[in-house]
Image (spheres, helix red, strand yellow):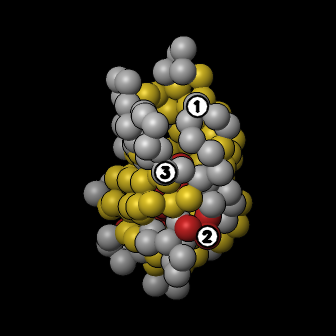
Amino acid sequence: MRRIARLSVSTGLIAAALATTTAAVAHGPTAEQRVDGVIVVAGNTCTWTNAATSADPPNTLTVDRATVNRPGGDLGCDGGITATLNNNPAFTFDDTAGTARADVIDISGQQSFISCRYKATGIVWDRDGTTRKYVNRAFTATRTSGSFLCPGSVTTAAGDASMLFH
C-alpha cells in the first residue's frame, strides 16, 4: 500500500510538472501567446489549455502559473491527483537547433493526505518539425519538500510530455 501511494504521488507530481512545462503550437502570424501542456507518467495524465505566455516563440517567454492552475486555469490530472505549478517557468528557444529549454519547473502534487513538491532545472524540449510543439527529453525532478512517502526524485522519460505554443 505504501509503495502504491508513493507511485501514485510521484506519477501525479511528474505529470503536473511536465504539464506545466509542456505543449505545442503552429508557427505563424496569428499567434495568441498561449500554451497547452500534457504529460503522461505511469499511466496518469495531467493537462492544461490556453495558459498565457509573456511572448511568442522564438522570443524568450514565461508561462503564467495563474493561468495554468485552477481557478484561473484548467490544470487537471486523472487518478485522483491534484497538482499546482509553483513558479512561472521561463522558456528560451534555439530555432536553428530546433530546441527549447525551461529554466525551472517547481510543482506540488497531492493525493489523499500525501503532498510532495519537486523541482527540475534545465529541461530540454525538441521541436516537432516546423511546428511550435515541443516534446521533452528525459529529466529528473528532485523532491524539495513533502511527506516521507514521497520519493527523493522522479524521472520523466523522453516523449512523456509536450508543450504546444499558439
Of the numbered discs 1 and 3, the one sitting upstream in the chain is 3
Q: Residues within 10 Å of mark 1 (few under 14, many from 20)?
A: some
Of the numbered discs 1 and 2, the one sitting upstream in the chain is 1
Residue 48 higher or lower than 164, as above or below? below
Residue 25 higher or lower than 76, as above or below? above
Q: Residues within 10 Å of mark 3 (few under 14, many from 20)?
A: some
Instruction: Name the front one of labels 2 and 3.
Output: 3
Asked which secondary structure carries label 2, the reply is helix
Query: Is any atom of residue 127 visible in this view?
Result: yes
User: Looking at numbered disc 3 in the image, what kind of residue is underneath it?
Assistant: Glu
Residue at (32, 72) in percent of width and height = 79
User: Looking at numbered disc 1 in the image, what kind of residue is underneath it?
Assistant: Pro
Residue 13: percent from left, percent from top: 50, 62
Instruction: Write down the residue under mark 3.
Output: 32
Which image quarter holds the N terminus? bottom left
Instruction: Write down the residue under mark 1.
Output: 58
Instruction: Write down the residue under mark 2.
Output: 66
User: Looking at numbered disc 2 in the image, what kind of residue is underneath it?
Assistant: Ala
Alpha carbon separation for disc pair 1 and 3: 13 Å
Badges 1 and 2: C-beta atoms under 8 Å apart? no
Query: Is any atom of residue 110 visible in this view?
Result: no
Instruction: Name the front one of labels 1 and 2.
Output: 1
The quarter of the displayed image where residue 93 is located: top right
Q: Looking at the image, which is closer to me, 73 or 10?
A: 73
